Amino acid sequence: MAMLALPDELLLEIFNNLFLPPPPSPPSGDPKRHCAEGAALPKVCRRFHRLATPGLYTHLDVHFTDAESGDPTYSAKLLHRTLDENSNLHHYCRSLRLILPDPDYQSQGLPLNRASRPVRDALLMAFNITAWLKNTTNLFISGYFSHSRTHSVSLALVDSVGKHMPRLEKLSIGKQVWLERVWYILREIKQLRSLEIGIGVSATNKHPRSKFIGSSAITSLSVDYLLAPPLNLERLLLVPEALEHFTFRGMYPGCYWSWPLSQMITAVERHQTSLRTLQVASGRASGDATNDHSLEDEVDDVDLSGFTQLEGIQFVAAPVE
């Protein structure tokens, strides 16, 4: 009851430093006293929720399925219901992490209505959340993105992001997503400035249409383990108008493993007047006797004279995965 007497300023300080610890176990003692305190609890909770709301909903981390059972988590269901019933909370979110399920083999590449029920329920909640939280500026999506070009249960979520999050500035997506979707996102989300693509990115041999070339204002691009011919990386780099930061981490043998660093530099030459930082993981380990040239030799052979804005560059040896 003493908490009710505290001013809002002090309670806000408490929330900022120690955010809503778990409630203690019910104490033993006079049951009448506990009943009186319980009667005042709704008033306390309403006040606490009013003060804590900005902190509660500014940064959301949503795990949609339980690691053991594979069923949707209670916390995800509760958050979904709360957001569904309280549209006044939608504008608070700025940072959102969606941890999607890795569907069983029956769900990979299938339409949403044919996915297993836990996967379908989790993804439907994710669709709704991305549609509601339109003010999100930083989005991280972790989960399985099917190899299938159409009817993928996860790629539809990427499309939803493009349609409903116009203020998105940073997007991180993981696991096997087709580059055509990436081109679309870069073109449609005008505010996007940073894109991180995770492990196992897939691509086709299509060239981006002219409307995509130079259509994106992103300044930072990071790519991990691109499972595509080198030409696809060059085509991806056509979409940003002027990159300032580019990171290419890790390579699979047979794709970019034999790429010399000079060829990577050629791929980013389109951005030589704007690029400020460049980080590249080379498949050629330093001092590897099986290679004609060590990493040090390749660095010496790289011509960076045209990169007038370059402030930092890092070449590292990438281990075999």
Image (cartoon, rainbow, N blue to C red):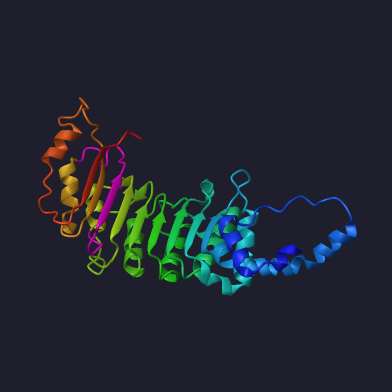
Report the magenta stretch's main SS: loop
- Whether residue 177 sits left or right of residue 53 in the image: it is left
Question: Could you say where residue 261 lies in the image, as x and y percent from the top left?
Answer: 18, 42
Span colored in magenta: 238-259
Residue 132 visible: no
Q: Quadrant of the C terminus?
A: top left
- Give above or below for 239 relative to 228: below
**Residue 235 occupies quadrant:** bottom left
- Examine the structure image and report whether residue 254 is included in the region drawn in magenta: yes
Question: Could you say where residue 257 lies in the image, as x and y percent from the top left?
Answer: 25, 38
- Whether residue 284 sits left or right of residue 99 in the image: it is left
At 20% across and 52% down in the image, what residue appears?
A: 311
- Whether residue 311 sits left or right of residue 151 in the image: it is left
Residue 223 visible: yes
159 or 304: which is nearer to us?
304
At 22% across and 46% down in the image, what residue appears?
A: 313
Question: Could you say where residue 172 lies in the image, as x and y percent from the top left?
Answer: 40, 55
- Whether residue 70 sits left or right of residue 154 in the image: it is right
Q: In which quarter of the image is the N terminus?
A: bottom right
- Give above or below for 255 relative to 174: above
Question: Could you say where residue 312 lies in the image, as x and y percent from the top left?
Answer: 22, 49
- Examine the structure image and report whether residue 11 is included in the region drawn in magenta: no
At 30% across and 55% down in the image, what residue appears?
A: 221
